[in-house]
Image: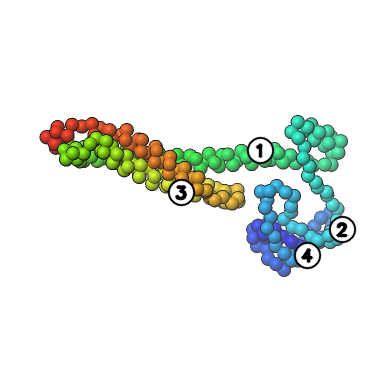
């Protein structure tokens, strides 16, 4: 006769047909579990872990609950209501939602930090790669310019290379941030979270622009070296 919320049933290892026993006000009540149901707790609608059909608990003490909307400029009425009826318990859902929004903002900030740190790691790897291959790049650029390549063509090839690296770095950053967001949302807050395409495309675009610009600024010396002097010294 009892309907149990699926999440609490899994946590307590409850199954259909199991018997639950409750004690309330010196009285005892036992009934079998006849159904399991799913509850969207994030909707903040009134609900319970266990429900019984009408008439089963008529002999037990009862408490009534309700919900109403109160404009923010009339919150003083809540104090007057509690003062006049001390046995009433009031929950300010607006304040609870404010705390929930604050937590979600912190989670979003953590995901953004992961995204930024991953991009910074890509920039550091790129910086190390540029300096480790500095002499080879200068020598290649000198040969290409000797064979007729223009400065704009060399810059274009470098830009294409670093934009490609930026796309990959942005994708890795977006995937890392999305995975962290999913783990935090599902494991800690038990909310469903699925990263949207805006995260992937935004990450790839940010990586392409950031690393592309940084790569060009870091390798300008390659095309600025006189090819004749480079080949003589090479």
Answer with mark 3 or mark 4, whichever residue precedes in sequence: 4
Answer with mark 1 or mark 3, whichever residue precedes in sequence: 1
Question: Can you identify the residue that label 4 sits on?
Answer: 1
Q: Is 134 positioned to the left or the right of 95 in the image?
A: left
Q: CA distance from mark 4 to mark 1?
A: 37 Å
Task: Give the mark toward the camera: 3 or 4.
Answer: 3
Q: Report the front residue among 120 and 21.
A: 120
Question: Can you identify the residue that label 1 sits on?
Answer: 98
Q: Is 234 positioned to the left or the right of 125 in the image?
A: left
Q: Report the front residue among 128 and 151.
A: 151
Question: What is the quadrant of residue 31 in the picture?
Answer: bottom right
Q: Residues within 10 Å of mark 3 (few under 14, many from 20)?
A: some
Q: Residue at x 74, y 52 (%)?
A: 47
Answer with mark 1 or mark 2, whichever residue precedes in sequence: 2
Q: Which mark is residue 58?
A: 2
Q: Residues within 10 Å of mark 1 (few under 14, many from 20)?
A: few
Q: State the SS at label 1.
A: helix
Question: Can you identify the residue that label 3 sits on?
Answer: 175
Answer with mark 2 or mark 3, whichever residue precedes in sequence: 2
């Amino acid at each position: 006769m009892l309907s149990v919320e699926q999440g609490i049933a899994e946590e307590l290892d409850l199954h259909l047909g199991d018997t639950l026993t409750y004690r309330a006000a010196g009285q005892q009540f036992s009934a079998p579990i006849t159904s399991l149901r799913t509850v969207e707790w994030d909707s903040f609608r009134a609900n319970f872990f266990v429900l019984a059909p009408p008439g089963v608990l008529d002999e037990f003490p009862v408490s009534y609950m309700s919900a109403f909307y109160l404009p923010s400029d009339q919150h003083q009425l809540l104090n007057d209501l509690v003062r006049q009826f001390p046995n009433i318990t009031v929950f300010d859902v607006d304040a609870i939602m404010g705390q929930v929004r604050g937590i979600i903002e912190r989670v979003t900030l953590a995901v953004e930090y992961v995204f930024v740190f991953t991009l910074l790691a890509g920039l550091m790897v790129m910086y190390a790669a540029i300096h480790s291959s500095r002499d080879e790049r200068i020598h290649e650029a000198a040969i290409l310019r000797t064979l007729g390549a223009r400065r704009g063509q060399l810059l274009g090839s470098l830009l294409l290379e670093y934009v490609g690296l930026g796309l990959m770095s942005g994708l890795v950053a977006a995937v890392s941030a999305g995975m962290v967001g999913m783990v935090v949302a599902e494991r800690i807050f038990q909310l469903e979270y699925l990263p949207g395409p805006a995260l992937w495309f935004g990450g790839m675009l940010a990586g392409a622009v950031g690393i592309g610009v940084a790569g060009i600024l870091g390798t300008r010396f390659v095309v600025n070296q006189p090819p004749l002097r480079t080949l003589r010294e090479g």
